[in-house]
Amino acid sequence: MLPTGACPSPDALADVRERAYATLLGSALGDALGATVEFCTQSEIRAQYGVLRKIVGGGWLRLKPGEVTDDTQMSLCIARSLAAVGWSPSDIAERFAAWFKGWPVDVGNTCRRGIARYINHGTLAGPFNEGDAGNGAAMRVAPVALATLADGRLLERWAVEQGHITHNHPLSDAACVLIGRLIHMGCTGQPRERLQRKVEDVVAKFPPFRFSPFRGLATAYVVDTMQTVLHHFLSTHSFEECLVATVNQGGDADTTGAIAGAIAGAFYGPAQLPEHWVRKLAPALLYEIQDLSGHLVERSPLGHGQPVVM
Ligand code: MN
Ligand code: MN
């Protein structure tokens, strides 16, 4: 574990790089696994799969096994932008626009509206909107967490700025920041109790995120999404168990899977990513995730030798 205030040794940094890889890969795996049952109810999943444990494709998007969706694609837009030019919301928005014009397999309504606003008006943030409390900004925040490792303040700023390109709502902002913080803690090897305490602190400030007793809702409303992710992350003890429990909740399963996969990937590290899942992803995607995660850590304050500030 990297203690607060300590500069990273080369060995410690190598471990962070591995965990950063597991963060992005974990997220893509959660997306690919969960997409099969996106918008299904728990009983529909039970009837068709018993428990969904394999990456089999299909679902309402009729995906090939291992195919990923907007969650991973928008994350990649941000990761590529950060690796290429550093922090530039306009470059991220440009990449969202180019992706959007390429007929992606799926795009959420709030993302669609935000990207259309950018294309038509060039603005990098919409005004506050009550309807912007979806999970579309939170699902793509992982690369921002990796690029801001060791600097919680920077994370807060960038996580919210990337979010506002499509979603302007305090609950979405809070979710983006919390997910980013948990990724920071996971990547720097903090113990479970510290992550748990962080979650408890945030839940105390944002009571809607309270997930105990768990209501079992997993819709695209960021409150439901966060409750599902936090509940399953904190009540399971392996990467695979966490993701299986999360996506079998149904609802916005690819997105809860992507977020849980990022947090659990950072926390458990690459050794826990199930080989039979990883094999399903396209080799080019695996290669790019490896490459980008390395770049993001290098560009982060931690990669520049800055001590950890939580
Ligand atoms: Mn999706
Ligand atoms: Mn989704």
Image: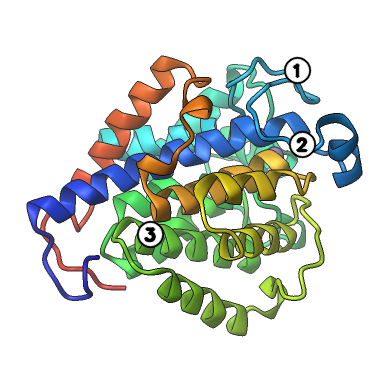
On residue 38, the disc is: 2
Judged from the image, the quadrant occupied by ligand 2 is: top right
Name the residue type under label 1: Arg
The picture quadrant where one finds residue 102 is top right
Q: Residue at x 43, y 43 (%)?
A: 272
Q: Position of residue 4 (x, y in %)?
A: 22, 75
Assign a secondary structure to mark 3: helix
| C-beta proximity under 8 Å, tags 2 and 1 | no
- Residue 87 can be seen, yes or no: no
- Between 263 and 164, the one lying in front of the other is 263
On residue 290, the disc is: none
The span from disc 2 to disc 3 (Cα, nearest Å) is 27 Å
The picture quadrant where one finds residue 3 is bottom left
Location of mark 3 (residue) = 186
The span from disc 2 to disc 1 (Cα, nearest Å) is 11 Å
Q: Residue at x 50, y 74 (%)?
A: 196
Q: Does mark 2 have its CB less than 8 Å from ligand 2?
A: yes
> Dot 2, how many residues are within 10 Å of its Cα: few (below 14), some (14-19), or many (20+)?
many
